[in-house]
Image (cartoon, rainbow, N blue to C red):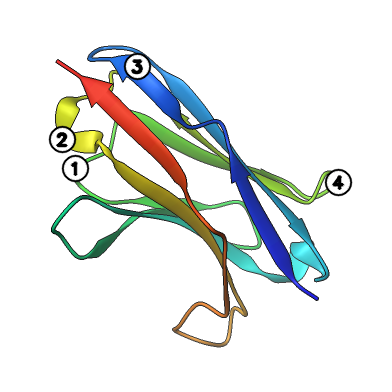
Amino acid sequence: QVQLVESGGGLVQAGGSLRLSCAASGLTFSSYAMGWFRRAPGKERDRVATINLSGIPNYADSVTGRFTISRDNAKNTVYLQMDNLKPEDTAVYYCAARVPTRTTYDYWGQGTQVTVSS
């Protein structure tokens, strides 16, 4: 059974930092592209950052220069370092796993809340 478990969310002031982690189990982690997504209240889920099998990242324009995605295949974990947080970053953050040959994500975590106060 595949499980993705996010952690590291919380309440932070604007300008602060948080590091999200997503621990994967039940799949061959190194064979999956990974992504972070978020859903703000009343809005649709948006892509935040993705990382492919080679560790090459891709970011949404809104977070470029502030967020960093990384993966540790030895620990079956993907991270999202979030710096210079803004109130508009407030959302539930989800990690997801995708077989590289597919365009849709196959597995999703339960989400972790990030709240940025002004």
Q: What kind of residue is marked 3?
A: Val
Position of the N terminus by quadrant: bottom right
**Residue depicted at 53% across the width and 52% down the height:** 56
Corner quadrant of residue 30: bottom right
Where 91 falls versus 88 (above or below)?
below
Q: Secondary structure at mark 2?
A: helix
Q: Secondary structure at mark 1?
A: loop
User: Would you say the residues marked 1 and 4 are in contact, meaning their CB atoms lie under 8 Å apart?
Assistant: no
Q: What kind of residue is marked 4?
A: Ala
Mark 1 closeness class: few <14, some 14–19, many ≥20 residues within 10 Å = few
Residue annotated with mark 3: 12
Q: CA distance from mark 1 to mark 4?
A: 30 Å
Q: 7 or 100, which is in the foreground?
A: 7
**Between tags 2 and 1, which lies in front?**
2
Q: Earlier in the sequence, mark 2 or mark 3?
A: 3
Image-based side of 8 in relation to 72, left or right = left
Mark 2 closeness class: few <14, some 14–19, many ≥20 residues within 10 Å = few
Q: Secondary structure at mark 3?
A: strand
**Between tags 3 and 1, which lies in front?**
3
Residue annotated with mark 4: 74
Q: 99 or 6, which is in the foreground?
A: 6
Q: CA distance from mark 4 to mark 3?
A: 30 Å
Q: Secondary structure at mark 4?
A: loop
Q: What kind of residue is marked 1?
A: Ser
Residue annotated with mark 2: 88
Q: Earlier in the sequence, mark 3 or mark 1?
A: 3
Where 47 falls versus 67 (above or below)?
below
**Residue depicted at 26% across the width and 51% down the height:** 60
**Between tags 4 and 2, which lies in front?**
2
Residue annotated with mark 1: 62
Where 56 falls versus 18 (above or below)?
below
